[in-house]
């Protein structure tokens, strides 16, 4: 059944056309991801589909049986209300459902998401906890279309995995904007891409999308270098995954790489940046016994670490466990309660944080970078990469470079801030949630940059795919004041934890069994006597049963004897059953 049909939709913002004359439909059971570059109009299209914004042209027609819920990127709740009061406002039960029952369903889901204090005020919640309220409400309703705009932003990895599992098991339709490539691979069965004002449709998951996109570019006259590089890099990565070991899958991936690199292409400008005059010294950065607490909550205590050259370290942990706090201490923006941060003389930190930097909204993008970050980056061979070239690498063409910052989308401003940090020539890069709001092509460029960056990288990200591609060591905060190091990427950590949990479960089961065996009650003198007597009684009853069976199966004409034997046979069977059960009970305690 068709749920929503969009016909000939067009939308512009200012002098920029987002999309023109696009049409599509969503049917029952569809799990569609909407992707595209920052500023292409993804969020705008979702709002049009949900009836929250009008298109310039075209229509959206909804089925009368449509029941839809929309999870926005950043939900807005009254900061002075408690969670409980917010739930009173947003609990809208279906016909025939009591409002308090609906509220209880939301609270139950919030408990699954580790939000348990419903008397806490919204203003005291993290962005992730506020997002969880919106998610819990949406999942509590009986809907046949769930619309999600960047559902993973600001959420911890455990919650993201929870959402993924929920969506995978969901049979009703889904429409979501996401750049989480594990979502695209594991959840969706179709991808819509906004590209150059058009909408392109792909069937299947992320792997299928890469195949079909490669074929589309092969058939077109556009042999764009960036797209081919994107496809090739993605497939090189997917080939290294366990699921790619099958012959059929490998052949398919090789085909994509062949398409992506078929024509002779000019070499792109190298991303192997050098920090001229800022090479890392022997001492890079040393953490000595740092601790940090807020009120009665310990984030971490007595943590020490010495950074070595070209390390790639990710930090993971639940919301509120202290990830950003740790970054702020390491960068000397915040003092620890105990311990010291010793920074090497040649160490220059570039910090991409969640707050961003204040930008003159009337300034052109290129002028902002030139005036605030620098004109160029020096290469090892003495050549330079200019601010304009760096902007181009991160998706700012000449038109966008000359555009006022106020005209950029949220994701484009995030990208501009990233260029601002990189153009300062750091040799120790700190990235706090760099992937939020970035499109797939920009993520690839950033991954490529980190891979070739000749310095240390320390990052916090809830993008599991990005973490797998960029880090080889992890700091793990558990939210209870403990922090440990783990050698490997995020998937390695998950595999290790899964194995460890199985081993712990096995040890516990063995321990419980051993404990039961140790607690076995030893038999008393009378019980031992009873056990021996039961053995004799059972033996005698079994012999008598055999004799009675012969009489019953024989050809005796003594009907009275047969009747008496049948009655006794039933009596003995019942006696035997009870005596054997008692014997087994006593025998299990015999030492």
Image (tube, grey):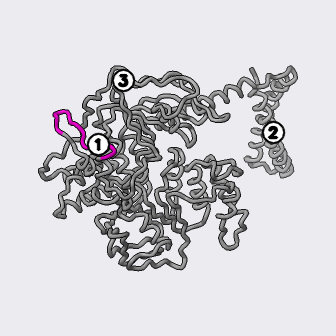
Q: Nearer the viewer, residue 522 or 446?
A: 446
Q: Which residue lies most toward the left here?
A: 264
Q: Which part of the image, by quadrant, shows the C terminus?
A: top right
Q: Nearer the viewer, mark 1 or mark 2?
A: 1
At 44% from the left edge and 77% from the top edge, which residue is drawn? 60
State the image coordinates of residue 81 (x, y, percent, origin top left).
68, 57
Identify the disc placed on residue 374: 1
On the rendered structure, is 336 left or right of 266? right
Q: Give the residue at mark 3.
A: 345
Q: Give the residue at mark 2.
A: 578
Find numbered disc 2 in the image and state the secondary structure of the residue it sits on.
helix
At 28% from the left edge and 65% from the top edge, which residue is drawn? 196
Q: CA distance from mark 3 to mark 1?
A: 22 Å
Magenta span covers which residues?
A: 371-383
Q: CA distance from mark 1 to mark 2?
A: 91 Å
| Sequence-first disc among 3 and 1 | 3
| Sequence-first disc among 2 and 3 | 3
On the rendered structure, is 58 left or right of 322? left
């Amino acid at each position: 059944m068709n749920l929503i049909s969009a016909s000939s939709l067009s939308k512009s913002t200012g002098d920029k056309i987002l999309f023109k004359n696009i049409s599509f439909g969503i049917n029952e059971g569809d799990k569609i991801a909407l992707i595209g570059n920052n500023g292409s109009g993804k969020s705008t299209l979702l709002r049009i589909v949900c009836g929250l914004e009008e298109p310039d042209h075209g229509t959206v027609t909804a089925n009368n049986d449509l029941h839809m819920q929309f999870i926005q990127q950043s939900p807005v709740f009254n900061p002075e209300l408690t969670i409980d009061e917010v739930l009173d406002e947003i609990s809208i039960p279906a016909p025939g459902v009591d409002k308090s029952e609906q509220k209880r369903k939301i609270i139950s889901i919030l408990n699954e998401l580790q939000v348990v204090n419903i008397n806490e005020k919204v203003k005291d919640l993290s962005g992730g906890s506020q997002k969880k309220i919106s998610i819990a409400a949406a999942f509590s309703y009986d809907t046949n279309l769930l619309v999600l705009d960047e559902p993973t932003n600001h959420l911890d990895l455990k919650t993201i995995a929870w959402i993924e599992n929920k969506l995978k098991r969901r049979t009703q339709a889904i429409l979501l904007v996401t750049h989480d490539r594990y979502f695209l691979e594991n959840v969706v069965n179709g991808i819509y891409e906004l590209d150059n004002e058009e909408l392109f449709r792909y069937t299947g998951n992320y792997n299928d999308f890469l195949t079909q996109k490669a074929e589309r570019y092969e058939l077109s006259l556009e042999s764009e270098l960036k797209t081919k590089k994107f496809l090739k890099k993605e497939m090189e990565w997917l080939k290294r995954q366990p699921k790619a070991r099958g012959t059929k899958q490998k052949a398919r991936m090789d085909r994509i790489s062949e398409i992506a690199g078929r024509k002779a292409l000019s070499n792109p400008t190298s991303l192997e940046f050098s920090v001229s005059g800022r090479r890392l010294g022997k001492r890079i950065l040393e953490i000595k016994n740092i601790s940090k607490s807020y009120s009665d909550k310990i984030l971490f205590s007595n943590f020490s670490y010495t950074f070595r050259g070209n390390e790639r370290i990710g930090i993971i942990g639940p919301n509120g466990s202290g990830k950003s706090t740790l970054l702020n201490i390491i960068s000397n923006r915040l003092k620890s309660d105990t311990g010291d941060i010793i920074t090497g003389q040649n160490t220059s930190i570039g910090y991409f944080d969640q707050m961003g930097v204040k930008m003159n909204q009337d300034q052109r993008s290129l002028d902002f970078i030139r005036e605030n970050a620098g004109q160029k980056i020096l290469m090892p061979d003495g050549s330079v990469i200019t601010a304009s070239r760096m902007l181009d690498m991160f998706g700012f063409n000449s038109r966008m470079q000359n555009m006022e910052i106020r005209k950029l989308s949220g994701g484009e401003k995030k990208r501009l801030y990233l260029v601002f940090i990189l153009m300062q020539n750091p040799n120790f890069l700190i990235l706090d949630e760099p992937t939020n709001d970035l499109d797939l092509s920009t993520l690839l460029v950033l991954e490529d940059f980190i891979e070739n960056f000749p310095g240390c990288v320390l990052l916090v990200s809830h993008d599991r795919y990005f973490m797998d591609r960029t880090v080889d060591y992890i700091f793990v905060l558990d939210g209870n004041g403990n922090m440990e190091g783990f050698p490997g990427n995020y998937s390695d950590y998950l595999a290790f934890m899964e194995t460890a949990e199985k081993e712990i479960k096995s040890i516990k089961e063995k321990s419980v069994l051993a404990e039961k065996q140790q607690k076995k009650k030893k038999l008393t003198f009378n019980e031992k006597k009873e056990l021996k007597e039961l053995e004799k009684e059972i033996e005698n009853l079994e012999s008598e049963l055999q004799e009675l069976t012969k009489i019953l199966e024989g050809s005796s004409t003594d009907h009275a004897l047969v009747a008496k034997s049948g009655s006794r046979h039933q009596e003995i069977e019942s006696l035997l059953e009870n005596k054997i059960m008692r014997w087994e009970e006593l025998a299990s305690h015999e030492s």
